[in-house]
Image: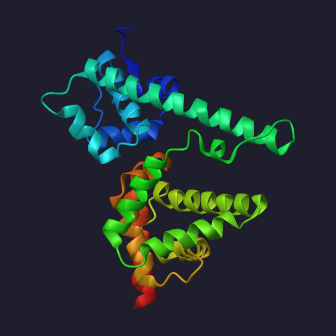
Amino acid sequence: MNRTMTVKQLARISGVSVRTLHHYDEVGLLKPAFVGTNRYRYYGRDELLRLQQILLHRELGIPLGEIGAILDAPGFDRLEALRQQRRRLAEEAKRYAQLVRTIDRTIASLEGERTMRNAELYKGISAAKQAEYETWLVDRYGGDMPQRIATSRRKYSELSETEREALNQELQDLEQGLAEGLRRDVPATSTSLDPLLERHRAWTSAMWDRPCPPEAYAGLADLYLSHPDFAARYEAIEPGFAEYLAAAMKAYAARLAG
C-alpha cells in the first residue's frame, strides 16, 4: 500500500491517462511525491488519495479549475469530504435506480405487458435539476431565452430516434475532432479548425431551429465556459478542452463577423 508508483502504473490502476496526469502536475493539481534521477514521476499513498478526491469531485460535476482550491483550502478534511460524497452518491444511486424502474415500466407498457399511469412516466427524473439549469440560463441571458428553451425542447421531441442518434453522433464526432486539435497543439485561433467549427455552428442552428449568427455563437462559447455542467463535460473529454473550445468558437465567430 505504501510503495511508490510511476506515472504509467498510476494511469493503469486509476484509468486516468498519462497525459492527463502530466497535465495535473503542470497546473499544480496533483504533484508527484518526487521526481527520480531518471526524471520519472513517482506517486505515494497521499498522492493516490488526492487523485481519488480529484476524480470524485469530477464525478460530482465540480469544474476542474475549482477542485484545486477545494482540496488546498485550510479547513479541508479528506475524511469528512468522503462522507459527504458518499451521501450525495447514495442519493443519486437511489434516483438512478428509480429511473431504471421507470424505463423498465415504460418498456413493458409500450410492449403491452402492463398499464402505466401518465404520472409514472416521470418518476426519478429530477425536475429540480432541470429547473435550476433553465433558471440559470434565463437569469444570465434574459431576453428570449425561455422561448429558445421551449423551441429546442419541441424540436428535439419531434425528432425520430434515428434522427436523435444521428445528431448525438455528429456532436460527439465534432467534439472529438476539436479535442484532437488540442491534443496536437493546434492553436485555437487556427483556421484549420474552421470546417469543424462550421459544422458545430450548423449543429447548434439545427438544435435551436433558427440561425446561429456569429455573435450568438460567441455567446454560446461564454456559456460553455461559465456554466459548471458544460465546463465539467468538456474537461472530461480532454483537460483544457473547455477553454480551448471556447477560444476556438470565439476566434471563428470573429472571423465570420469581420
Q: Quadrant of the N terminus?
A: top left
Residue 4: name its quadrant.
top left
| Residue 197 vs residue 210, the one in the foreground | 210
Viewer-closest of 3 and 169: 169
Residue drawn at (35%, 60%) of the image: 136
At 38% across and 65% down in the image, what residue appears?
137
Residue 255 image position (x, y, % from top left): 43, 85
> Can residue 40 be seen here?
no
The residue lying at 45 percent from left, 29 percent from top is 91
Q: Considering only vertical position in the picture, is 251 above or below 27? A: below
Q: Is residue 164 above or below residue 48?
A: below
Q: Residue furthest bottom?
A: 258
Q: Can residue 148 be seen by looking at this rendering?
A: yes
**Image height check: is 27 above or below 82?**
below
Left or right, 222 with respect to 190, comes to left
Q: Which residue occupies the extreme left position in the image?
A: 74
Vertically, is 180 above or below 209?
Answer: above
Q: Is residue 220 left or right of residue 50?
A: right
**Where does the image place residue 217, in percent across and percent down from the top left?**
45, 76
Q: Position of residue 111 (x, y in %)?
A: 86, 42
